[in-house]
Image: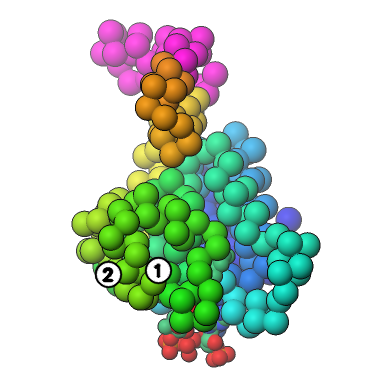
Amino acid sequence: MTYEYILIQTEQKVGLVQFNRPRALNALNREMVSETVAALESFDRDPGVGCMVITGSERAFAAGADIKQMAQATPVDMLDNPFIDYWDRLRRLNKPVIAAVSGFCLGGGCELAMACDMIIASESAQFGQPEINLGVIPGAGGTQRLTRAVGKALAMEMVLNDRRLSADEAARFGLVNRVVPTESYLAEAMKFAAQIAARAPVAIRLAKEAINAVYEMPLQAGLAYERRLFYMLFATEDQKEGMDAFVNKRPANWQGK
Ligand code: HXC
């Protein structure tokens, strides 16, 4: 498959998608988001991939949805061609997805990063939901996921008054996992993803599913769900392998079975 707006590669069981519209600061047009989700779904099906990374450029992860493409849209255009459904498809991926963010991470770009499972930020990353400046509000999770991540007080400031977060603030408020030097942010994210990709694949998949279920269900239901997933892992060869490896003081050899 060839892509026009993204670059892809696989390295150490990590599937990498890199936005490639640098002159538009990786503004998310329909085609780029569609290609991104198609590439991620293909990595998700590939047994040679255990973890995925999405990134942009050092200057911009993504400066938001493409305003020029949206400017003249009607509500019916939006309904007929549901761009935002791609964010839901990202959420449905089985394998972990890490956003490696540098520079501008705004609007739909911030919503895309938040739809990933983890965020590694460069020191120069800047997070914001500036839609209010355009007379609209976030439409792909910016009022919902952001509020769950940073709390109501800060989310209100960010969405109502275009308050931007520096990388350090984003780490302090729990939006990102860690902040790393700008020169090496992608290498750091790839290294982190490779560590996850080397772990027991079925357990990784269910661990991701169980943590994300926190946002969908009440505590008692979540605990019961976690327990069922935990029990289910005792049907895998990897559970037998992992525990035998511990007992016999040797490294485990995961099969993903
Ligand atoms: C289309 C964009 C764009 C965007 C930047 N560009 N952001 N094009 N959509 N979101 C283009 C500019 O038009 C310009 O192209 C080129 O990228 C460089 O941008 P500049 O503005 O010249 O750069 P700079 O002065 O450094 O300012 C950077 C910036 C600013 C602060 C990020 O570009 C900006 O405010 N962009 C818009 C941010 C935003 O409002 N995002 C939310 C979008 S709405 P030309 O050809 O003119 O030189 C949204 C809704 C999501 O995301 C809904 C759910 C999907």
Can residue 102 be seen? Answer: no
Q: Categorize mark 2 by other alpha carbons within 10 Å: few (<14), some (14-19), many (20+).
A: some
> Is residue 200 rendered to the left or right of residue 74?
left
Q: Is residue 173 magenta-colored?
A: no
Residue at 51% across, 22% down: 255
How dense is the environment of label 1, judged by Cα within 10 Å: few (below 14), some, or many (20 and up)? many
Q: Residue at x 45, y 11 (%)?
A: 231
Q: Are marks 1 and 2 in contact (CB under 8 Å)?
A: no
Q: Is residue 223 above or below residue 214?
A: above
Judge depth for marks 1 and 2 and give the one in front.
1
Q: Residue 34: x and y, percent?
A: 67, 60
Image coordinates for residue 37, horizontal then vertical, percent: 63, 54
User: At label 2, which amino acid type do we have?
Assistant: Ser
What amino acid is at disc 1? Answer: Val
Q: 78 or 173, which is in the foreground?
A: 78
Look at the image and tell me in which quarter the N terminus lies: bottom right
Residue pointed to by mark 2: 166
> With 199 as the anchor, is 122 left or right in this view?
left
Query: What predominant SS class does the magenta segment belong to?
Result: helix
Q: Which residue carries the number 1 mark?
A: 159
- Which quadrant of the figure contains the C terminus? top right
SS label for mark 1: helix
Looking at the rendering, the stretch of residues picked out in magenta corresponds to: 228-257
